[in-house]
Image (spheres, grey):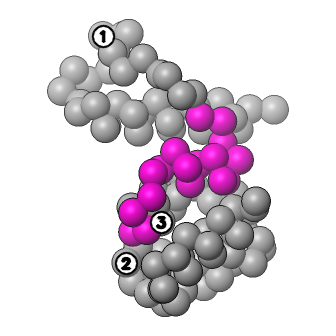
Amino acid sequence: MSLGDYLKTQRKNKDWSQRDLAEASGISNAEISRLESGVRKEPSPSILKSLSSALGIPYEDMMRAAGFAIDESPSLQPSSKSLPQDLTEEELKDVYKYIEFIRSQRT
């Protein structure tokens, strides 16, 4: 299933219009239309995060639908002193997902 199909299915499961999702997520109605139609194929992780939060679905599922590889068992313990020690578990998950996104962009 493509990201557009996945997004449309999740939106319709909530009986929302594209405008409803736009208002709930802070993402423009035009951008949601481009994503669902497949015109926009590679949205940023921050857009995916906003959409998953608005729809109440796991961010990991949205990332998978967008084609990102998600490590199912990342170590949430900072392995480097350069990482801030005051991050919550959820914030650490986001950091590791973003790192994975950056790695996936390598050619």
- Disc 1 residue type (three-letter): Lys
Are circles 3 and 1 on residues that touch, CB within 8 Å? no
User: Picture coordinates of residue 56 (x, y %)?
Assistant: 39, 63
The residue lying furthest to the left in this view is 86
- Disc 3 residue type (three-letter): Leu
Which quadrant is home to the C terminus? top right
Q: Quadrant of residue 105?
A: top right
Which quadrant is home to the N terminus? bottom right
Q: CA distance from mark 1 to mark 2?
A: 37 Å
User: Picture coordinates of residue 104 (x, y %)?
Assistant: 69, 35
Q: Earlier in the sequence, mark 3 or mark 2?
A: 2
Please provide the residue range marked out in magenta: 54-70
SS for tag 3? helix
SS for tag 2? helix
Residue 64 visible, this orientation: yes
Q: Earlier in the sequence, mark 1 or mark 2?
A: 2
- Name the residue tied to disc 3: 51
- Name the residue tied to disc 2: 24
Q: Quadrant of residue 86?
A: top left
Identify the residue at horizontal 48%, vertical 86% (top origin): 16
Q: As rendered, which of 72 and 35 lies closer to the eye?
A: 72
SS for tag 1? loop
- Name the residue tied to disc 1: 81
Q: As rendered, which of 85 and 59 lies closer to the eye?
A: 59
Q: Nearer the viewer, mark 1 or mark 2?
A: 2
Q: CA distance from mark 3 to mark 1?
A: 32 Å
Identify the residue at horizontal 75%, vertical 61% (top origin): 2
- Disc 2 residue type (three-letter): Ala
Q: CA distance from mark 3 to mark 2?
A: 8 Å
Question: Which mark, by number, is residue 62?
Answer: none
